[in-house]
Image (cartoon, grey):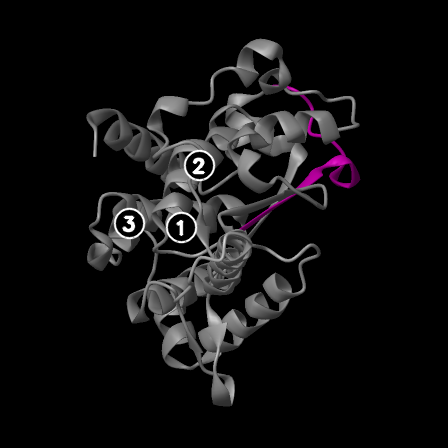
Amino acid sequence: MSSHHLLTLSLFSYLLFFTSFTPISAALSSSSPPDSSEKVPLGLYYESLCPYSANFIINYLFKIFENGLISVVDLNLFPWGNAKIRGNNTFSCQHGPSECLLNTIEACAIEAWPDLNKHFSFIYCVETLVYERKYPEWETCFDKLGLDPTPITECYSSGYGNELELQYAAQTNALQPPHEYVPWVVVDGQPLYEDYENFISYICKAYKGTAVPNACSDLALNTIPKEKAYSSHPISYREEATKSTLSKIRSAITSWMEQFDVAVAW
């Protein structure tokens, strides 16, 4: 990870620790807070070990805490992504058992620390390690942020974390239109599809209140660090969506070949 990222994480941790997790936006913006009913709903449906989800969280989503836009946003995280429910309320995850573990740990963090700044700081730390390919070191985030691991370990070991994950599964599977990949970003009820990296502009357009943050200026909208993204529209498809796409391609090729009496074998 670059020295810039390390400095950013250190500064983020410092602010959270020494302000007892008071809203970062209060420290970064002197404007009066908007009414909660005016806040723009922002939902992130993701999975913990997806590199594109980690990229979005640490290089894009974090910006709304840094620039004060969080003051007009109602952010909710859904750590389930492309996981699948199996029999007896068990589930499997796209990136294996380690992802199921971290999905559940992050679900427990959201439950144990309802304060957004507190659970987001933990998830940001874990996803930074995912981004660095050091996710087995996720427990170091407790010490880095001065957090007591007890509520998280109790949540996970008791099985309550699994119950939370099944709730996130229900919420993710109830999306209309259904999610096709992760990260799946929804602003004010509308999915952004592959334009999710520009989520700030959608938030600004959706915000109808009077306490307009500076981040919604034209200059601020051009500061999203595109060079830090993996590639254009980085996404991780659901297995079903991938199969559906391949099926459509295969069908189209078969139809074309049949027009020319070409033998087809799959």
**Residue underneath mark 3:** 130
- The three-letter amino acid code for the residue at tag 3 is Val
Is disc 1 surrounded by few (<14), some (14 to 19) or many (20+) residues within 10 Å? Answer: many
Question: Above or below — where is 157 with respect to 2?
Answer: below
- The three-letter amino acid code for the residue at tag 2 is Thr
Q: Residue at x 63, y 18 (%)?
A: 216
Magenta-highlighted residues: 30-45
- Residue 220 lies, in percent from the top left, at 54, 15
Q: Which mark is residue 123?
A: 1
Q: Are marks 2 and 3 in contact (CB under 8 Å)?
A: no
CA gap between label 2 and label 3 equals 26 Å
Question: Above or below — where is 172 with respect to 66?
Answer: below
Judged by depth in the image, the label closer to the viewer, 2 or 3, is 3
**Residue underneath mark 2:** 19
Helix, strand, or loop for circle 3? helix
- Which quadrant would residue 34 be assigned to in this image? top right
Q: Which mark is residue 244?
A: none
- The three-letter amino acid code for the residue at tag 1 is Ile
- Residue 31 lies, in percent from the top left, at 66, 20
Q: Residue at x 61, y 15 (%)?
A: 214
- Residue 123 lies, in percent from the top left, at 40, 50
Q: Earlier in the sequence, mark 2 or mark 3?
A: 2
Helix, strand, or loop for circle 1? helix
Counting the numbered discs, the total is 3
Q: Earlier in the sequence, mark 3 or mark 1?
A: 1
Magenta stretch encompasses residue 43 = yes
Q: Residue at x 28, y 30 (%)?
A: 5
CA gap between label 1 and label 2 equals 18 Å
